[in-house]
Image: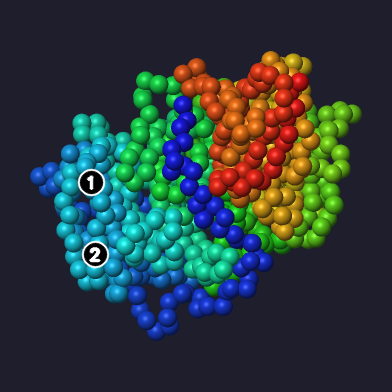
Amino acid sequence: MRHHSPADHVTGRGSRVRFLAATLCAAVALDPTGIPRGIAVEQIAINDNRTPAGTLKDGVLTIRLEAREGEWYPDRATDPGVRVQAFGEQGKPLQIPGPLIRVREGTEIHAFVRNLLGKDTLTIRGLYQRGGASTEPFQVTPNETREVRFVAGVPGTYYYWAAPNADPVLNRRRGASTQLSGAIVIEPRDATPRNDRVIVMSLWSDSVITAGGPVPRRNRIVMNGKAWPNTERLSFTVGDTVRLRLINAGEAVHPMHLHGFYFRVDSRGDERVDTVFAPNASPRMAVTERLTPGRTFTLTWVPTRAGNWLFHCHDNEHILPNAPLADAIRLRPTSEHVGNHAEEMMGGPVMGFYVKGTNLDAPEPTAERRKLRLVARIDTVFSESEPAFGYTLHEGKKTTGTKPFLPGPTIVLKRGQPVSITVVNELSEPTAVHWHGIELESYFDGVAGFSGATGKISPPVAPRDSFEARFTPPRSGTFIYHTHIDEVRQQRAGLSGALLIVDDPAAYDPSTDLVMLITTPRRSAQANVVLLNGTTTPGPLELKAGTRYRLRFINVHTFRPNMIMRIYRDSTLMTWRWVAKDGMPLPNDQVSVRPAMIQMGNGETYDFEFTPTEPGPLRLDVTSAVNALLVRMPINVR
């Protein structure tokens, strides 16, 4: 069962970190390195979290940490750097993220922390026994060294961090101090150490504080110290057991999405506690898992198909292309020529996974494929920077979708039936379609310039061209299709929709099987507005008392990872039955009747069964994390 702790409801200022050019271009003129000219500083090393720090002897790990300033290169080594504070071991280079503390349960940790940051007093958190009596931070004044001893307690994934103030909050760190974080991994006492990878996520910006809040001038969201396309590329073989430990030590919310596969969520935690899910319970499966500031989760994934696969944050504004640090980050028009759309039009918290070997999945069925055409069209063009696009769906002589092309037509497919969907591009710019949550061959996954494998890479769909995607959906559930080129611009323009897989399309009844599609308004001036099924003013939903409905919630908004959906009668929260997550039906031990409320990250889908028990008015409210109403759908029960 998926539980949301109070920490999961952190709004995270990073969830609204704006990367839009109009906001940023006015605040750019500064030295390209961020470092005063003529002052030499040491270069910070990138830490892949594969080598534990310190010296282990007779059951005691001794580690000597120093906080110093250095020059960090989150992009290429030839791109401009930025001056930040970081941790390193005494006598060794600074690292981002900080040195990895990795020990067995029961190990004594003897840590020395020295503050070489000049005038800043540091508050240090995270260096204490997990499961112990105290989690109190300690302070280190300039040029002081503090010593601390504690026993590595409950096994799990944790972290330590610092900030230059007395009462720090992790997601309120700004500027130079945002990279003062490192991972702590505690292995079970007698277990064989697992081959896993530790990934620390963080965000840096040199914001200007204004009356309206912080305005970022330059930004980087990184995974283990690097931003895409310079993040580490991980290579695996079909059948490998891949284990990842994710730590969000930054200020932004990151719904982490794996292309082409489900992964098992093994634990959820934070700085203090890591809750490992019972190994004898049914696995918790997802394709997108929401990771709020200060939180952690671990996952296991077994790739069964070869190819190139992305793992990235699904807050689209977080994966906008990086510009050199000397420039403002901007939205590059899709019409501008690029050599590789995946690498030149994505940035930030993205990793590439390369899988080699022979596929383990069953071969594609030989049955005749159902043939569909999905046409990307121009709707009403507001401007080059704020276009209006949409899809129409064609099967034989049947067409779904008419102007205005919002929302995108719902595609309903049959489980186990091979399908061919030809994406036809009638736009004036390239596009591509990602079949979000669908298990398929990499080449058809829809990331232009990356999907596929060496010698056969998925191309962008050029104007007046087409691309045929072929797959056989293996399970019934709620999925998404959306553009994967210039994601913010093209998704906001209207290029997304619901993809439903059902056991029997003839039995699918849209009057009781209800899609709730959350998307972004086309105009940037409506940034605080949310569309529900393509409109800000959805008409009343007509329901019958005693009838069971399936509500399919889909969040494909481009930048709101904290929205909450609720059903009320007056001020009373109704109840519903949770039955599926990300298209995966829940096992019986996870199905539950609960209050009719769910907080969703971008790229997540949730299915609920809802049975109104008596006539009368209800309402579906979509709000922000702080309960500001974004859109409301009236519900009439008769």
For the C terminus, give its image quadrant: top right
Q: Nearer the viewer, residue 309 or 103?
A: 103
**Res. 453 visible in picture:** no
Q: Is residue 308 left or right of residue 334?
A: left
Residue 281 lies left or right of residue 437; in this view the side is left
> Could you say which disc has been placed on residue 30 in the image?
none
Task: Give the total number of marks visible in the rendering.
Answer: 2
In-front residue for pair 278/325: 278
Residue 610: x %, y % from top left: 64, 22
Q: Position of residue 417 (x, y in %)?
A: 69, 21
Q: CA distance from mark 2 to mark 1?
A: 18 Å
In this view, the residue farthest toward the bottom is 38
Identify the residue position indicated by label 2 in the image.
140
Where is residue 381, by image quadrant?
bottom right
Left or right: 601 with respect to 267? right
- Residue 577, percent from left and from top: 57, 22
Q: Is residue 441 above or below residue 58?
A: above
At 24% from the left and 58% from the top, the residue drawn is 138
Residue wearing tag 1: 134
- Which circle, 2 or 1, is nearer the viewer? 1
Q: Mark 2 or mark 1: name the one nearer the start of the chain.
A: 1
Categorize mark 1 by other alpha carbons within 10 Å: few (<14), some (14-19), many (20+).
Answer: few
The three-letter code of the residue at mark 2 reads Val
Query: Label 2: how many residues lie within 10 Å, few (<14), some (14-19) or many (20+)?
Result: many
Residue 525's place in the image compared with 306, above or below, is below
User: Of helix, strand and loop, which one carries label 1?
Assistant: loop
The relative height of residue 170 versus residue 33 in the rendered view (above or below) is above
